[in-house]
Image (spheres, grey):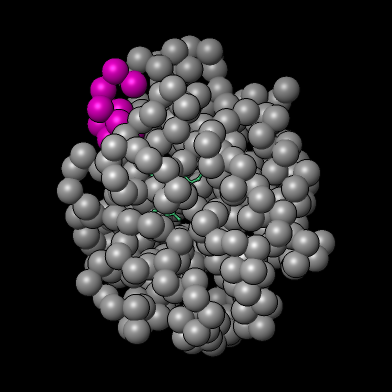
Amino acid sequence: MFVLLRKITKALHLFPPEISHYLALYGLKVIHLCGFKIDLPGKFESINGMQFYNKLGIAAGLDKNGDFIDCLASLGVGFIEIGTVTPLSQEGNKKPRLFRIRSSEALVNKMGFNNKGVDHLVSKIKIRKTKIPIGVSIGKNFHTPNELAHKDYIYCLEKIYEFTDYIAINISSPNTKDLRDLEGESELERLIKPVKERQLELTNDYGYKPLFLKISPDNDEKGVEDICATLLRFSIDGLICTNTTINHNHISGSGGLSGKPLMGSSTETLRIARKFLGDEFPIIASGGVMSKEDYLQKIDAGADLVQIYTGFIYEGPKLINDILNQ
Ligand SMILES: Cc1cc2nc3c(=O)[nH]c(=O)nc-3n(C[C@H](O)[C@H](O)[C@H](O)COP(=O)(O)O)c2cc1C
């Protein structure tokens, strides 16, 4: 079955990247509706109060609106991060905005938080059937200035809180103007202090849902340590290392690079963070996992959980099977 799915995945690459993305997801939905499902073994581990059947998850951006939660879950992953979602729906950047670099097993994207808005995502996450943890990645609308960004994040937090298992604060997409400036110490503080306060208030009604921060792979050692120090100061619950990198020379000129060439800088960011944060702090790795060896390298570098995106685009569900069952 997985070999067949891999062949179908390769065939879909005859289409432009964004079209093949949706063909693949709708195809998965059909296969799922026909009854395909991987049975998961018993519960294995608790992280931040969440129960994970395995450490492998789908990274944010693959299912931006929560339209494909159950069919992705049926592939056997331990968790899924949906989003990034913003308060209002938005188109994102102009097409073409997703490029394959087949020779280096990479993608360059400049999507720009195209999504249907948080209300749509809530309507989908509410009716999911899967029991695996679902995280929601939240962001700000394109036109919201950084000084007011916390309002967009809090707006999304309030809408999704009851229904999500964890929240990922995405400040590391390179495709929303100036978003990464939010990684700077004072901007980060201005964002996460009120978000943290709201999380604690919402806990009274809906229980504690952990907050993760997703960072870029393009900070130097001191930059990563400064972010980690701020996380500890504000009792943020976890870290996601990393988003895509802007260090590339693809002809599209801008955008974020993911896949194989991201593995090095992303894993280095993870190592620095793990050293600074200590053994107990929850860290999710994302960036460059194209094989079981890459997955094991992330665990070895200190990841508690590992996400895939570009590897899944290139290999299809076979990558999940390779990582979990070989
Ligand atoms: C087309 C595309 C869209 C993405 N959208 C998001 C997003 O909305 N939010 C986010 O946090 N990360 C997003 N990412 C980044 C991925 O979640 C992931 O962190 C990154 O691609 C590195 O992992 P990979 O090398 O396994 O792809 C996106 C990546 C791609 C390729």
Q: Which residues are magenta?
A: 13-23
Q: Is residue 15 magenta?
A: yes
Residue 217 placement (x, y as % from top left): 54, 54
Is residue 44 positioned above or below 183 on the image? above
Question: How many numbered discs sit on the rendered protein?
Answer: 0
Would you say the magenta stretch is mainly helix, strand or loop? helix
- Left or right? Give the position of 41 relative to 157: right
Instruction: Tell me the quarter of the picture where residue 28 sits.
Output: top left
Q: Is residue 10 left or right of residue 286?
A: left
Quarter holding residue 207: bottom right
Q: Could you tell me which residue is drawn at 47 percent across and 27 percent down?
A: 104
Q: Is residue 141 above or below residue 13?
A: below
Give percent across and percent down for residue 191: 46, 81
Measuring from the top left, give residue 20's x and y in whole percent: 30, 28
Horizontal side of 1 relative to 249 (left or right) equals right
Image-quadrant location for residue 152? bottom left
Q: Relative to 30, does residue 222 appear above or below in the rendering?
A: below
Magenta stretch: includes residue 295: no
Q: Kindly identify the residue that appears in the image at 41 percent across and 58 percent down.
A: 173
Q: From this viewpoint, which residue is outermost toward the front?
A: 249
Q: Using the image as rendered, state which of residue 70 and residue 82 is in the foreground.
A: 82
Q: Residue at x 67, y 77 (%)?
A: 229
What residue do we see at 62% from left, 66% from top? 224
Q: Is residue 262 left or right of residue 225?
A: left
Q: Quadrant of the C terminus?
A: top right
**Residue 56 locus on image (x, y percent):** 63, 41
Residue 23 seen in the figure: no
Q: Between 90 and 35, which is closer to the camera in this rendering?
A: 90
